Amino acid sequence: FSRVPKIQAKRGLFETSCVSLKKADREDDRVQREIEEGCGEFVDIGGLSLGEALGQIDSLGINILIEMNGYTQHARPELVAHSSAPLRISFLGFAHSLMSPFVDFMVTDSTATPTDLWRSPERAMLFPFTFYLTNHASSFHASHLSSPSSLPHVTKTQVGLREGSFVFASFNQPFKITPELFDVWMRILVLVPDSQLWLLKLNEGEEAEEHLRLRARSLGVEDWRLFFTGSAALEDHIGYKSAADLMLDGVVFNGHSTVADTLWAGVPVLTIAGTRMAARTCTSLLQGVHYGQGTMNHLTVARDLSDYQRIAVRLGLCPSCMSRLRRKLVHSRLSSPLFDTERWVGDWERGLKMAWE
């Protein structure tokens, strides 16, 4: 892994070793310390050659190798291809098949990858609810929000938004915004008076803001209605999200941990169930947090962009609808599969045992 939530395995069922692909930076230090304390052995192979890294990994005597980066930043898929581990599993970090003959299973669920959409050489390790792992109830930066009474009460004014406005938000990185989706967002703002769209400027920085504002102006949207911020400190970012009313998810590549954080802050999320795992992960998370709540999840899972716009406008114009939706979300968080880490670990261990056998 390079940076992932902590997996708390039950002692005695598996001996767990963790292999870090990169040196922890200053922000990651505390996260890495938690991971080191939660596993049997911890090995840092950042900067090692292929041969050196394989030597370190093979010395651990691993039976089941869990690959958590896929083809993302800092990934080293060649380690999976050359590993001597008899069972290899792709999990969490890359929301798609690796399309590799060296991987035996991919961890997913029937919402993220329905049977009729499965086109992968790996076998599917299906979770009963959502495949996505969270540990918000015990994490140092989120556990203080573990009861409805302790949900953050960050006001719009504190963040810099207009008090009294309906705030749509996209907490995803700007590269997930497609031209078609942004135009839909602008139509939503036009149809919901005094609403704002809260966007992040990460990585792409000032250039992304400039281009998005230019497009918004061409569609008749005033500058004040687009609100840009940078990233917040790890211990503050979930609380800040609570100032939003509704998160608008990306449709080609969904938010993953961003969506989980937003739901934990008590903010509903609107998405579209796409045709690929990366475009269905948010739907999986909503299934995990709204499970057992009737048709609640269907209210924020759109069929297409037209339906997406219709739902957003309806919620933006209906304070009682939003209040009811948010109340249901807040009360379902603590009992939901998405935020029940112990239940997830139990499903994970059963899946590993079945795959091994």
Image: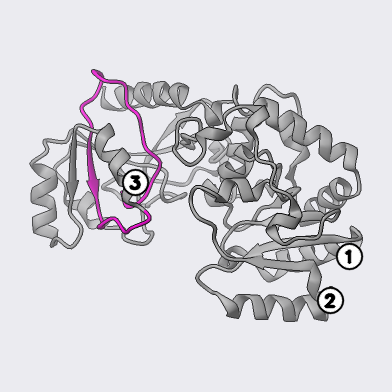
Give the x, y percent position of residue 158. Answer: 70, 55
Q: Quadrant of the C terminus?
A: top left
Which label sits in the foreground, 2 or 3? 3
Asked if residue 181 lies left or right of residue 191, the reply is left
Query: To which quarter of the image does residue 171 belong?
Result: bottom right
Magenta span contains residue 355? no
Q: Position of residue 179 (x, y in %)?
A: 69, 71
Crowding at mark 3 (Cα within 10 Å: few <14, some 14-19, many 20+): few
Q: CA distance from mark 2 to mark 3?
A: 45 Å
Tell whether 168 sits left or right of 128. Answer: right
**Residue 276 appears in view:** no
Magenta residues span: 1-27
Figure quadrant of residue 77: bottom left
From this viewpoint, is residue 265 visible?
A: yes
Name which of mark 2 and mark 1 comes first in the sequence: 1
Q: Which residue is mark 3?
A: 30
Which tag, 2 or 3, sits closer to the chain's start? Answer: 3
Q: Which structural element holds mark 3?
A: helix
* Amino acid tagged 1: Val
* Amino acid type, mark 3: Arg
Q: Which of marks 3 and 1 precedes in the sequence?
A: 3
- What's the colour scheme? one colour
Question: What residue do we see at 75% from left, 57% from top?
Answer: 157
**In the orientation shown, which residue stands out farthest toward the front?**
158
